Amino acid sequence: MQKWMRVKLALFFMSIVLFLHVLGAGTSIFLLDKGLRENMDRSLMELLAEIRPSVQIIEGRPSLKSWAETVKRGKLKIPASIQLYDAGGRLLEEYGPPGVPRLGNGRLESYPGAVESRVRSWNESIVRQGVLFGHLQVQDSSRQKNNAIKQAIYAALLVMPFLGALVALIGYWFASVALTPIEEGVQLMRRFVADAGHELNTPVAIISASLETLEEVLREHNLSQDLTDTIAKATARMSELASDLVFLARVEDPMSAYPIGPIKSKGLIEDLAGVYDPLASQKNIRLKLLHIDDAEVVGNAEFLRRMLSNLLSNGLRYTDPGGEITISTELTPRYLDIHVSDTGMGIPPESLQRVFDRFYRVDKARSRLAGGAGLGLSIVKAVVEAHGGKVSVASEVDRGSTFTVSIPLSRRVQVMP
């Protein structure tokens, strides 16, 4: 259980870090893209301002032919696409790398069917003496910018698995360090409960022995034994409580080594039914076995026997004479479901979630009269969880209850869905 808690915390840390990584990388890429666009637009505007004075008006149309000849003679490279349009938006001249033959500012893409081209574009109108002669436009390919963004995205994606693995390892180590004091405290509490239970057994044994002696003396003198009967019941209850505490601490102790192996469910259930049938008959309660699968489960025989014994004891305790207790099983692909049903007093809906809590009793007055230390169902839950199973209850007041425990099947008999 502690190991699984460490894994859950490590996965939690990893999820948070990866979320922050994605958030940070996304923000960084957005800002990088924005910065690159602004730099490109600034460069285009500077180039536009540099070329603008070279535009000549020849026969009512703008021209850059003289400028182009000068550039050609100087063997200079034109860094961007430079375009001249007439007042109607028709392309007149173009110099440098091919661009997108369309007026516009910002991002421009080539028409469908043309050579794919994405550019950043900037233009301004050519006006002389209040007359519009055309438009001067400069464009630069956004390929480098897009490649830079793609590389940033690939880098962020490439880092993710390594970052996730590293954070998971660090998170597991951190969880181990953080949980160690808590686990030590829980372990100390379990040991205390186990030790207290063991220590209780000694005075209880002394009280029981002394009580037997006192009863013999009272019988010899024909004196009332009412007081000794009360002491005997209290002693029995204390003994049961001590036994339950020790057993519960043993089941929940992860350091406790107990044998696990294949167990035939049918034999286990029929043996327990044979033990409890006389007890049921004494209370005029019918104990019936319905369909019992002869399945092989994996677990500890002592623990499973105690778990089923507690369910049957619980049914006998809260079922009135004339009632009935039934046991049945059902096979699922990976589990054996064991159903223990009774026709007893039932459990109110508000108590269904608490019946497995320690010392919780639905009907406290009846529970005291019927005996029991209030740990029976807690032990059932602890045993089931120790075996990797599940436990649930369905109940109706005055109609009875059905407890269902699911115990993992042996691997060799599991049925794949």
Image: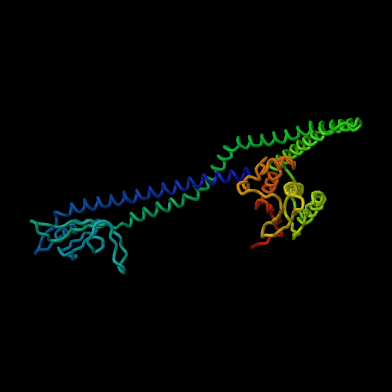
Q: Quadrant of the N terminus?
A: top right
Q: Nearer the viewer, residue 314 or 87?
A: 314
Left or right side of 183 for 62: left
Left or right side of 327 for 155: left
**Number of marks:** 0
Q: How are the colours assigned in the image? A: rainbow
Q: Nearer the viewer, residue 171 or 192?
A: 192
Quarter location, residue 329: bottom right
Left or right side of 287 for 61: left
Q: Nearer the viewer, residue 69 or 276?
A: 276
Q: Does 8 sit above or below residue 58?
A: above
Q: Nearer the viewer, residue 127 or 65?
A: 127
Q: Position of residue 26 (x, y in %)?
A: 40, 50
**Residue 404 appearing in the image:** no
Q: Quadrant of the C terminus?
A: bottom right
**Residue 84 appearing in the image:** yes
Left or right side of 184 for 286: right
Q: Position of residue 116 (x, y in %)?
A: 32, 64
Residue that lies at the very extreme toward the left in this rendered image: 129
Q: Does 72 sit above or below residue 379?
A: below
Q: Position of residue 243 (x, y in %)?
A: 75, 39
Residue that lies at the very extreme toward the right in this rendered image: 220
Residue that lies at the very extreme toward the bottom in this rendered image: 113
Q: Position of residue 258 (x, y in %)?
A: 74, 45
